[in-house]
Amino acid sequence: MRHIFFLVALSIVIRNISLALSPNYLSFFQPVYDDGLYHTLENLYNQSQYRQKNPTALIPDHTVFRYAAGAYLRGVDPIYINSEHTPLGKYFIALSIFLFRNDATIILFFVLLTLFVIWLLGLTLLQNGAWAMLPLVLFSSEPLFLDQIRVAPMLDTIQLPFILFALYFFIREYKKKRFFITALMIGFVIATKTVVPGILLIFCFILFFLIKRLFKSMFIFFAYLPISFSVLLCSYIRTFLNGHTFREFLGFQKWIFLYQQSKLIYPFSVWRLLFLNQWQTWWGEQRLMQSTEWQVTWPIFTGLLFVSLALVVTRKIKSLPLYMLFVLWCTIYLSFLSFGIVSSRFLFPVLPIMYIVGIYTLRHITLSFLRRKNI
């Protein structure tokens, strides 16, 4: 029965991904990125909101990333194009252009990597391959996830597996008091798009150490963090080769952080989005809109997260380290989002973990009820 359920769930996941790819399947594999396309993207960028006070056209994020990746491949310093995001994700896209002459091909690798690590995390907590497929089915059905595939390349798709792998390797390494791979994953997170999720991961791990009273392990973890910073430094090699100093690099990172702070308006709007599907815009009349990516699973599993947090605090559930870590991550990440304005994409790093936590909690509540009934 388990094998049948596993195969059915796997077929649903494959179907979801196939439907997302099918309208423009060839666009992921055709060698179309040439000098002509690059110069077209360059002209679009130069006439857009990124270069003009009164732009003739507004371009979406994935167009910016396509142009930036091509520019980086041609040796342009990442501080000059799309500098509000750290550059490693665009270097991955540039690698795709170099290998396949297509900027979207590599996204398929990160999609598969994301699905694999979600299943791996679910398997580690749920201890059952069939149960571990449920979060995978839920996340692969997300319009938010599928739209990331349709409008590839997007940096969120590249960053997400590194966030999830950081959680996975942390729980494997903390007992050994070695955090090399964890620190490496944090480095990939902060270098791919923005440093914020990496900082939140570090805070999550510190809180885990404090709750578990693992003070020695916490200080050992601190000793590994320069590895994370080294990954970020390496992503700016072109900047240093162009003569910029380490002090200028730090000043530039401060500018990126201050740029991200500009989104700290309309606090608590994330909860309105999660529960009511009311998305607060930050341009024009700053109206409330409905998100086409919203799913009824968002309020359900957000509610289950609160139940999970209550069970952990009151110790009415077996306090598995991974379960506690997942609840901490969701709580810390959503608390951070509560400080400012959000769009649906901001939920990308937390939804897979919310689904795993929610399914584990539902199973625990159901089994506890059945045991009491048998008694």
Image: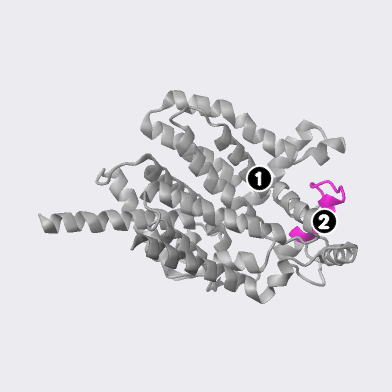
Task: Identify the disc placed on residue 183.
Answer: none
State the quadrant of the C terminus.
Answer: bottom left
Question: What is the secondary structure assignment of the residue under circle 2?
Answer: helix
State the quadrant of the N terminus.
Answer: bottom left
Q: Which residues are magenta?
A: 65-80
Rendered position, 217 above or below 60: above
Amino acid residing under circle 1: Phe
Position of 31 with respect to 371 (left or right) is right
Q: Residue at x 37, y 52 (%)?
A: 128
Residue 292: x and y in percent read 54, 74
The answer to whether residue 66 is magenta is yes
Residue 301: x and y in percent read 39, 61
Q: Quadrant of residue 298?
A: bottom left
Position of 341 with respect to 272 (left or right) is right
Rendered position, 86 above or below 215: below
**Circle 2 residue:** 70
The answer, for residue 156, to whether it is visible in the render is no
**Circle 1 residue:** 257
The foreground one among 39 and 118 is 118
**Farthest top residue?**
216
